[in-house]
C-alpha cells in the first residue's frame, strides 16, 4: 500500500515499508498515467536535453518500446568524470548484447508503459530487476534502442563496486543465466562462458581490483 501526496508538478508516492527496488518500480509503473515513462536515480544528474531527445525519438519510432543512452560516471564532483559506459545503439546488436550483458544504463531508460505492463512489469530479482525485465521484453519480441548521446552523469565509488560483487550478487546474475538457458535464449557454451566470467569478476576478485577493471576495461 502507498501513501500519495499531491504537489504542483508531480505526484509523490511514498511506500510505507521498504519492499525492495523491484516492487517499488512495479508500483511506480502502475501508478503512472502517461503512456511514456522516464526513469533515473535520485543522486544522478540528467543532462539538459535528455528527456527532449528521448521523447522525440520515441515519437518518431513507434516500434521502439525502450530507449536508453550513454552515461558518464563521476566521483564526488560532477566535473570529475572518471569513466563512461557505452552500450550499443542498434537493435540487432542489442539483441546479442542482451544475452551477455545488461543492454541499458538503467538510469537513462525511457519506455512505453503499455509494453512494460504487457511483459509483466518490473518484478523482484535481487540487484537485477531491470536486466530481468529487458530479457523478458526481448523474449516477447519488443524492440530496443539506445541513443549515442550521454544522457545522465552518474555518481560512482567503491560502494558501487562492492554491490557488484560477492556471492549474493553472483547468485542473482547466475539465476538470469539459468533463466535464459531454460528458455533457450542462450546455448550451453554461452551459459558456461557467461557464468564463469561472472564468477571470477564477482566472487574471486577483491573489491579494489574489480573497481579497477570496471573503470579500465569495461568502461571508457
Image (cartoon, grey):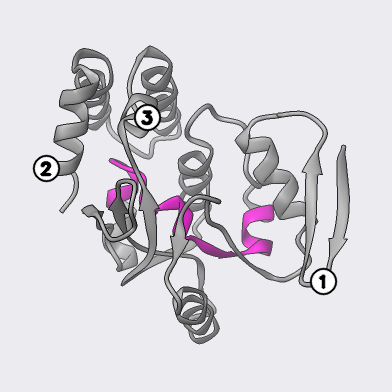
Query: Which residue is labeled 1 in the image?
Result: 8
Q: Examine the rendered structure and indicate whether residue 34 appears above or below residue 115.
A: below
Image position of 154 with respect to 37: above or below: above
The percent position of residue 126, horizontal first and vertical second, equals: 52, 27
Check residue 187 in the rendering and tell me which mark sits there, or answer none: none
Lower sequence index among marks 1 and 2: 1
Q: In this image, 163 relative to 123: left or right?
A: left
Instruction: State the quadrant of the N terminus.
Output: top right
Mark 2 surroundings: few (<14), some (14-19) or many (≥20) residues within 10 A: few
Label total for image? 3
Q: Verify CB contact (< 8 Å) between mark 1 and mark 2.
A: no
User: Residue 100: within the magenta?
Assistant: yes
Across and down, in percent, residue 196 comes to 21, 21
- State the separation of the CA atoms marked 1 and 2: 44 Å
Callout 1: SS: loop
Q: Is residue 84 visible?
A: yes
| Residue at the spot 25% in from the left edge and 29% down from the top edge | 194
Q: Nearer the viewer, mark 1 or mark 2?
A: 1
Task: Between residue 130 and residue 83, name the one nearer to us.
Answer: 83
Q: Which image quadrant is residue 34 in? A: bottom right
Sequence-wise, the earlier of marks 3 and 1 is 1
The image's mark for residue 216 is: 2
Q: Is residue 147 magenta?
A: no
What is the C-alpha distance between the residues marked 2 and 3? 17 Å
Amino acid at each position: 500500500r502507498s501513501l500519495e501526496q499531491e504537489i504542483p508538478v508531480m505526484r509523490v508516492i511514498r511506500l510505507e515499508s521498504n519492499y525492495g527496488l523491484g516492487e517499488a518500480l512495479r508500483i511506480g509503473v502502475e501508478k503512472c498515467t502517461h503512456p511514456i515513462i522516464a526513469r533515473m536515480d535520485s543522486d544522478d544528474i540528467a543532462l539538459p536535453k535528455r528527456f527532449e531527445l528521448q521523447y522525440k525519438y520515441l515519437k518518431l519510432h513507434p516500434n521502439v518500446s525502450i530507449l536508453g543512452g550513454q552515461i558518464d560516471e563521476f566521483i564526488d564532483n560532477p566535473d570529475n568524470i572518471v569513466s563512461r559506459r557505452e552500450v550499443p545503439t542498434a537493435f540487432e546488436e542489442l539483441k546479442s548484447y542482451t544475452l551477455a550483458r545488461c543492454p541499458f544504463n538503467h538510469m537513462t531508460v525511457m519506455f512505453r508503459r503499455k509494453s512494460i505492463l504487457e511483459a509483466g512489469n518490473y518484478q523482484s530479482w535481487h540487484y537485477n530487476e531491470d536486466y530481468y525485465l529487458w530479457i523478458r521484453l526481448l523474449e516477447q519480441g519488443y524492440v530496443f534502442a539506445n541513443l549515442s548521446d550521454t544522457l545522465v552523469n552518474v555518481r560512482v565509488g567503491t560502494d558501487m563496486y562492492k554491490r557488484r560483487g560477492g556471492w549474493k550478487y553472483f547468485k542473482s546474475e547466475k539465476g538470469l543465466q539459468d533463466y535464459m538457458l531454460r528458455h533457450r535464449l542462450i546455448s550451453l557454451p554461452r551459459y558456461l562462458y557467461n557464468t564463469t566470467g561472472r564468477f571470477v569478476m564477482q566472487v574471486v576478485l577483491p573489491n579494489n581490483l574489480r573497481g579497477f577493471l570496471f573503470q579500465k576495461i569495461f568502461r571508457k
